[in-house]
Image (spheres, coloured by chain):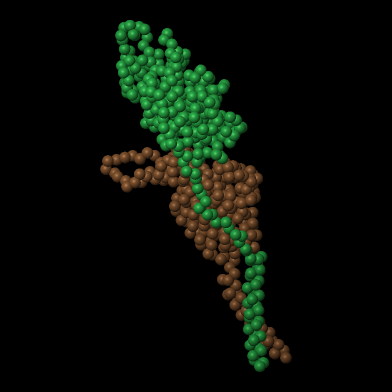
Chain colours: A green, B brown
Amino acid sequence: MRAFISIASRIIVVLVVAAAIVAGRALFFHEGSYQPSSVAMPGYTQVAVPPAPTTEFTDNFTKGSGIVLVDLAHRNRFFREELSPLFLPLVSRGLTVRFLSPADNLEKELLGDTEEEKGNGETPANGEEEVALNDGNEEEKEAPADVFIIIAPQEEFSNDALKTVKKFVDKGGKLLLIADPTRSGTQINKLAMGFGLIFESDYLYNMIENELNYRNVFITDFKQNGVTGKLKKIALYTAGSISSADAGIAFTGGNTFSSLVESRQRLSPIALTSDDKILAVYDITFMTEPYNGILDNNQLIANIADWVAQKGKRTTSK
Amino acid sequence: MKRFLRRVFTSFLFFMLVGVALGIAVAVPVIPRPKIVTISISGPMLDQAFTDDALDTLRKLGKDNSVRAVVLQIDSPGGGASLVEPVYLELLRLRQKKPVIAVVGSMAASGGYYLAAAADYIYAQPTSQVGSIGVFSGLPQAEQLAEDLLTSGLFKATGGSKRKAIEELEMVRQEFVSAVTLQRGGRLTLSDQQISLGALYLGTDALRYGLIDEIGPVTVAIERAAEMARIRNYEVVKKTIFQPLPFFFFFSVEQMKAQISSAPGYYYLYFESK
């Protein structure tokens, strides 16, 4: 019995000392135990985007005639093919679309032959001749343009060219000015400012209501006229704002801002001068596939084509 | 009597020493000296080797009982989305076992902040740059048709339409914002729209908006980690995740376009828009 107690007590001593060592070490390194808080693991099923708001559209138009000159003489930053949603309605309306190359005579294309040239029967030498869309008859080929379309020029218009364009407008010609903030280097303001329009160096954005991206803004506020007729809602894709005295015809809403100016204001990416001669549009993308099919974009393009097709009254004196 | 007492004392001492030896033999492996591991993530995360190394390191740290807390030192403008996301998810798994603290050095932008958001607590310096929550990607270009190269489907060569690419960009944006709001929770004072602006904030501003929790250097972060893990007299071990590009390597717009065309995808990356 004494032996048993002796052995038991020794074992107890060993265990107690060992336990003390273990406990001492634990207390030396630990103040307590860590209880991890619950970690929210992400679920990926709730991520979704709305479907594309495409709209069925039928282009109803009246066929007419006229000549549209499209500027390709100033390193214009666009491809003809990408703007087929714009050019096709023009051609459908019976318009002849000509392209101005750098070697062409702008004055002749916009204002026609001088009396002397007509009398002499001379045809001023041209450079390489651009092939026109809907190649009209001989008379149309020689006739000056009714509408001049300038899209994202990367070169400034010279002073002489500016004078020619001004004269063209004074005589009843119409201008369609198109730019896009993503086509950087565009030199359109020297021309536009002569008609009271400024294409600002900004883009419009809306963080709350947009067409899948903050740079794709909706426009629902329109001043009623031919260009905005039948429009309820359009989507513009990285559009810019055009400043003018009062030429704006489409306006941004409360949550759409300009990248240039942080304060809230009513901005206009589409403008039409009061004499109905200059139409300015500050987005190209909405006129390209597939963006033209979104909301009322095709209707806007058709309205622009109708505006182009409506010829202004031309005065004949030079 | 004296001899008896001496015998008892010697026997007692002997078994005490046995107890000490046994105690040490058991205590040292069972209660190792606790470690806090600091992991340095520096530079753009654009290499699969980075993700592989990060996942391997984090898994080992999760299994190692001697590691009681992890401190992430982040100095990164972000990286490829599919390279950042697995590391984020692994950090969340690690956080289920032990505290994870993030410390921002000069920058935790985009993917860098994505990883920081996975932590229990975030420190930054007063002039750290934090945020740039957002994603970018290139849009598919028109397919180049060739007579002698056929694909089996409309989108085989492009991956999808431009519309689909924009939809996916929006979905990835939502995922990023959700990843941040899920982990930061009520600490954030910014709305989803404000977060989506993708702004970079100074450390002091980031504190005000709840993007980080406190201003402080890595030494404070280590103490915080120890406090959360309830340890003392710990060892600090440093590890670095494989990073082929240095921290100061910033991308310009042209470099990003080249990067996207050589490795199309989505990027949680801050770059200088020059």
Specify whether residue A281 is in view.
Answer: yes
B147 up-or-down from A287: above or below: below
Q: Estimate the x, y position of residue A154 in percent, counting from the top left.
A: 44, 26
In this view, the residue in front, B176 or A7, is B176
In the drawing, does residue B116 fall left or right of residue B7?
left
B69 up-or-down from A83: above or below: below
Q: Residue at x 35, y 40 (%)?
A: B143
Q: Quadrant of the N terminus of chain A?
A: bottom right
What is the tally of numbered marks visible in this picture? 0
Q: Estimate the x, y position of residue B199 in percent, counting from the top left.
A: 57, 41
Q: Estimate the x, y position of residue A228 in percent, counting from the top left.
A: 50, 27
Specify whether residue A155 is in view.
Answer: no
Please identify the quarter of the rendering in which residue A71 is found: top left
Q: Residue furthest left?
A: B148
In this view, the residue in front, B213 or A313, is A313
Please identify the quarter of the rendering in which residue A292 is found: top left
